[in-house]
Image (cartoon, grey):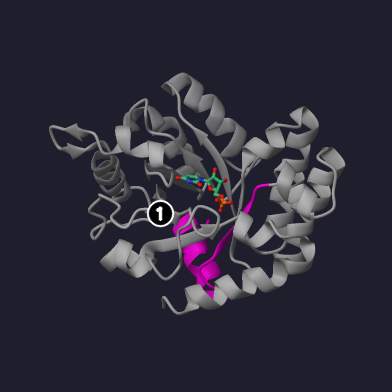
Amino acid sequence: MSTYAQRLAAATTDRGRLCVGIDPMASVLNAWGLDNDVAGLEACARGIVERLGGTVAVFKPQSAFFEAHGSAGIAVLERVLVDIREAGALSILDVKRGDIGSSMAGYASAFLGEGAPLWADAITLSPYLGVGSLSPAIDAAVAGGQGLYVLARTSNPDGATIQLADTAEGTVAQHVVDAAASLNETRDNAIGLVVGATHADSGCRLDAFNGSLLVPGIGAQGGTVESLASIFGQALGHVLPTASREVIGHGAGELTARAGRLLAQVAVLG
Ligand SMILES: O=c1ccn([C@@H]2O[C@H](COP(=O)(O)O)[C@@H](O)[C@H]2O)c(=O)[nH]1
């Protein structure tokens, strides 16, 4: 069985280091000439994978916009995750789960382990109940060759209040970085971090980080691919830039050209 880190390295070497977000919100559906209903959701989300699934390495469906349509929306999400896998791309399901251990085990069985109904190559997690509370998901991900991305320094302006708060060992964000790095030493480097592209200084020491860095905030939130080298320095090689509205938010007709432009920009990063 391959590990998530191995599959990610192979996919990004082959197709380039870009993750396209699938956030089928009302404004995106409108730009695609679709109604904000389940049929529109399905046409947009599966249409993105149909058009880009052979060229983009990683897709990140945002669970919120599928959950918003109830059980029918979640059924669409299941199909999108299968489409991504069948296209030979990787999926990061952005669900930002985090809870006490017993409930984390429930979430793990939804997303992690072969046969999980919403299986994805990786999922996002929130560490604010303590990094230790994520253990059931970490164990299930490693056993299933899947990955996790734990929120460290999010792209939104409000995140600083909590994430840059000081603890005895440094900021909360740095605690998350260091805990993930330490876990990775025995966990196949399955644990990545979310660090936004919107801060000139991430406020985290990432030079020694040994997992993948999922980097949102490019495009609609003001971050740029050009700024990644100065934000991430020696950790640049671990960065997986992700953009959603910048690529998918201007209608189906612009999708391929917009993804191509970003792929060309990230190629320069090496
Ligand atoms: O810190 C974070 C963590 C997650 N996100 C998610 O990424 C996308 C961003 O969409 P854009 O259209 O490219 O702005 C969205 O799903 C967020 O929930 C983030 O933006 N920042």
The residue drawn where x is 41% and y is 51% is 196
| Residue 10 on the magenta span | yes
Relative side of 88 to 192, left or right: right
SS class, disc 1: loop
For mark 1, what is the residue? Answer: 198
Relative side of 263 to 65, left or right: left
The residue drawn where x is 71% and y is 63% is 87
Q: Amino acid at mark 1?
A: Thr
**Is residue 3 among what the camera can see?**
no
Where is residue 264? Give x, y as percent.
Answer: 55, 78
Please identify the quarter of the rendering in which residue 86 is found. bottom right
Q: 20 or 136: which is nearer to us?
A: 20
Relative side of 129 to 262, left or right: left
Q: Residue furthest left?
A: 168
Where is residue 135? Give x, y as percent.
Answer: 39, 32
| Residue 197 on the magenta span | no
**Is residue 169 among what the camera can see?**
yes
The residue drawn where x is 24% and y is 60% is 207
Please identify the quarter of the rendering in which residue 223 is found. bottom left
Residue 154 higher or lower than 73, as above or below: below
Quarter of the image with the C terminus is bottom left
Which region shows up in magenta? 1-23
Q: 248 or 234: which is nearer to us?
A: 248
Residue 246 higher or lower than 114, as above or below: below
Residue 168 higher or lower than 187, as above or below: above
